[in-house]
Image (cartoon, coloured by chain):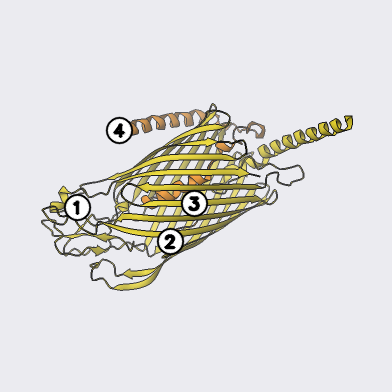
Amino acid sequence: MQLTQKKERQRKGETVRSLLSAASASLLLAVPLAHAEDTHQHHADHQHHTDGAPEQPWRVDIGTMRYSEKDRISVSEQNFRARRQLDEENALTLRADYDSVSGASPTGTTKIQTTSGASGTAYMASFHSTRMAAGLDWETGISPDARLTLSGDHSTSKMNKSSGIGTTVARDFNQRNTTLIAGASYSVDTIDMDIKTELTPDSTATIRATSEKKDQIDLQLGGTQVLSRGTLLQLNFVHSHASGYMTNTHKLISVVHPLTGETLTYSPLTEKRPDKRDSNALYAQINQALGSGVLYSSYRYFQDSWGIKAHTVDFKYRQPVTEKLYVQPHIRTYSQDAADFYRSMLAVGETPVYASADYRLAKLRTNSAGVKLGYKPTFGGELTARAEVMRQNGEQHPQDAIGVQRTAELFPELEATIFHIGYTTSF
Amino acid sequence: MVFRKLLACLMVAGALSGCSTMQSAMQSVQPWEKDQLAKEEMQLVPDRMEEFFDGRVYFSRESAFGGKGIGGGGCGCN
């Protein structure tokens, strides 16, 4: 009996030592690199035994989202991610995603056709598509202070395929309070469908091609800085260069009478976008511990060679309610200018080089607000549930509207709800 | 309007908290002082599912994209 108790005490002592060493290893080793990474970050719960073997080598995230637009499309999406810490230097992450989209989407044409206000028939178009995607990340240490990540991705749907590779290098400095990150990625997208000649009447347009490609290169330079015991700053700059087919084959532009604005019998035109796009995004994020809560603030400035400038501001505040439950309200606002070639409509006889009436290239604003609950159940892991509402508004009466179209509401306002449930566990 | 006022208040609060912590930024935080930074909720991406789903929604409804990182696979769509 005494022998059993002695063994029990010894075992408890070993467990305490193991936990203490794991905690210090977590603090001294894992923390700076955790800040160095973005989508492939370490986590503080990746503790190690003193012999180097990971204590909880697996981390699994699963989630499902339902996105519903009022009178428009709905998206159902499932996401899975499993990360395996192979040893102290190496980790593999497998990612998989499936989504299904169905419903109606604005084509870009105007709502009304005549001065009497008769409605157009091509204002909305219904569609249905499913998409599957998978990705793999390999993280490895290349020196005591530097880490390399290699990634590969592939997605496929009935008409679209996309493949990409990427790499990032993160290097720690200044007692691991500073991390610099550099990265590059390359992707190729293929569209397999009948593609009509651009900027020609939709009703008579001929099929120009059945497949088109787009390449994109992204370059990233960024860093993180520990500002205090409870403040972390991230700055990131990403330059993207895309070339190839970027026209949306489903979008149209109304052709109207130059004085009355009536569409009469004019067929809408197919759209055309430039085949080059250079964009720059500057992103800043601050995580600030406030008591037991954390405030996440971020700002992004975006501009591209299509003439779009955009600002995004995002705030989340995570506040524990009990040891097992936290609540996280969220607000986000986004605004963008119109692309240079955005036209709400064209007058008969106009022959622009590029033109699109896709409202996503118009001047617009998006506001979102929501709340998330996180709960740690007794069986382990963490459950999350989130509800969010999103509204998108734009110019209802743009300056290029003609005749009767000035009286119409041209921007297709959007109201959407997002529900998301997730579960994360380590073992 | 209420939304914008709330947003403006939060931006001011965020800027003030950032300024106050900049003063202590010159002093390096020692490894044994990183207990708070080591917590899950202090990671840059504390919830990867939330990050992923948000990225999918906004990428398909707005013209701006990226900034947080690179790669991650496209959708082949325009």
From mark 3 to mark 1, how far is it between C-alphas? 41 Å
From mark 2 to mark 1, how far is it between C-alphas? 31 Å
Circle 1 Cα neighbour tier, 10 Å, few/some/many (<14 / 14–19 / ≥20): some
Q: Which mark is residue A78?
A: 3
Give the residue pinned by disc 4.
B1
Q: Position of residue A336 (x, y in %)?
A: 33, 46
Give the residue pinned by disc 2.
B76
Question: What residue is rendered at 41% in x and 44% in y?
Answer: A418
Circle 2: residue type:
Gly
Disc 4 with disc 3 on a shared chain: no
From mark 4 to mark 3, how far is it between C-alphas? 35 Å
Label 4: which secondary element = loop
Give the residue pinned by disc 1.
A400
As drawn, A372 above or below A145: above
- Numbered disc total: 4
Question: What residue is rendered at 67% in x and 39% in y?
Answer: A26
